Amino acid sequence: MLRNIFDPALISALKSTFDHARNVVITCHTSPDGDAIGSCLALKEFLTKKGKSVYVIVPNYFPDFLRWMHGVDDIIQYDRAFAHSKTLIQHADLIVVLDFNDLSRLNELQLPISLSRAKKVMIDHHEHPTRFADISISVPAMSSTCELLYRIFMLIGRDSDINRHAAEDLYTGMCTDTGQFTYNSNDPEIFEIVAALMRKGIDKDRIIRNIYSQNTLDRYRLQGYVLAHKLVVDDTLHAAYFALTKEELAQYNYLKGDAEGWVNIPLTIKGVKVSISLREDTEKPQINVSIRSLDDIPANEMARRYFNGGGHFNAAGGRLSCSLDEAIRIAQEALEAYRPQLTAEAPQPEA
Ligand code: 5GP
Ligand code: MN
């Protein structure tokens, strides 16, 4: 039995909203990740089983390593199907937004969604949610939106409402949002949920291979180049960063998503507490920023203050409209601003 982390009134409002809905649109944040796609597909399975007509519309491209998932071919990509998406949104009586906490994370899809008069539900685990939905379920303590969704399914439905496909989807989100259960995953109940999902007959090992064994040689070579030539580590500041131009990416036939996760690598260097990745966007004149931190270093605050972004306490992102050299200067300034926290003595473990 999982502990109840919800306000019962909120769960009964959600149940009644789901019961009354007929035409549902589910969406998630721009550049969807495993948790975004996993939660959208799992909720689609759940609501379809309850007789609803359900469409998943995502703002833009999502990575190939998620394309093995059941039902991905039916996902509508807004930036490739404006008219069709708008029609579906206009006909929806319920819109559920997953894995983000502010409509701006939808980019161009924000406008049609906010114009819609459909009832809106937000289910998410990011800190500092804004209030735009009729029902907001925001639990930042969750490892992932997929974990949150599993808990909700068990309260408003039955175990039998979760089929094998939904179990695969939920496992994918929990696994990818925790770096294969290496961070944000100290709650024992996470593993009780994983055990329950495995009892649905999912092949966990194959899912991991499907997600993580999809590298190209170019991607590895680009990673080698980054580590050998681009990574800057400041030992005294316990900080690391790297910056990549479009031209450098092109030399290694960069594909969107290739740099995913690399910001985590410097954090595995002994002593490093914060890592920043700066990457010129291949389509827009912008620098994409990712920040990862350990322990009490607030990545999301740094993202808000210096990089027009936000996110989780230890994993955040943002963007800059400037040259890469200027972005490097801003990153150095941001790191310098956190010198007191970065150089503070680590608390001694209790004897
Ligand atoms: P990533 O580095 O993987 O792009 O993003 C790390 C985390 O920060 C993700 O959970 C992502 O949702 C969040 N994030 C990225 N950009 C923003 C932003 O502009 N605002 C907020 N609130 N979160 C962001
Ligand atoms: Mn997530």
Image: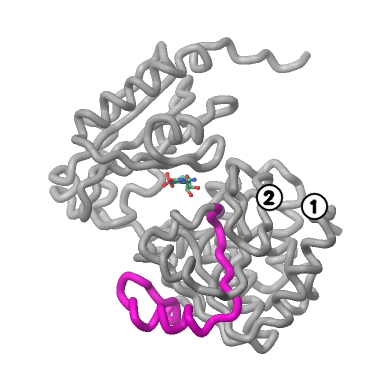
Residue where numbered disc 2 is placed: 139
Q: Earlier in the sequence, mark 2 or mark 1?
A: 1
Q: Which residues are magenta?
A: 73-101
Residue 250: x, y in percent?
Answer: 15, 50
Q: Residue at x 58, y 42 (%)?
A: 182
Q: Please say whether residue 92 is one of the residues in the magenta stretch.
A: yes
Residue 231: x, y in percent?
Answer: 29, 29
Residue where numbered disc 1 is placed: 5
Q: How many numbered marks does the figure carry? A: 2
Q: Residue at x 73, y 81 (%)?
A: 19
User: In terms of secondary structure, where does tag 1 sit?
Assistant: loop
Kindly indicate whether the residue at mark 1 contacts the one at mark 2 (C-beta within 8 angstroms): yes
Quadrant location of the N terminus in the rendered image: bottom right
Q: Residue at x 53, y 47 (%)?
A: 179
User: In terms of secondary structure, where does tag 2 sit?
Assistant: loop
Q: Please say whether residue 36 is one of the residues in the magenta stretch.
A: no
Q: Amino acid at mark 1?
A: Ile
**Disc 1, ligand 2: is the CB inside 8 Å?**
no
Comparing 145 with 227, the one in front is 145
Residue 301: x, y in percent?
Answer: 50, 31
Q: Amino acid at mark 2?
A: Val
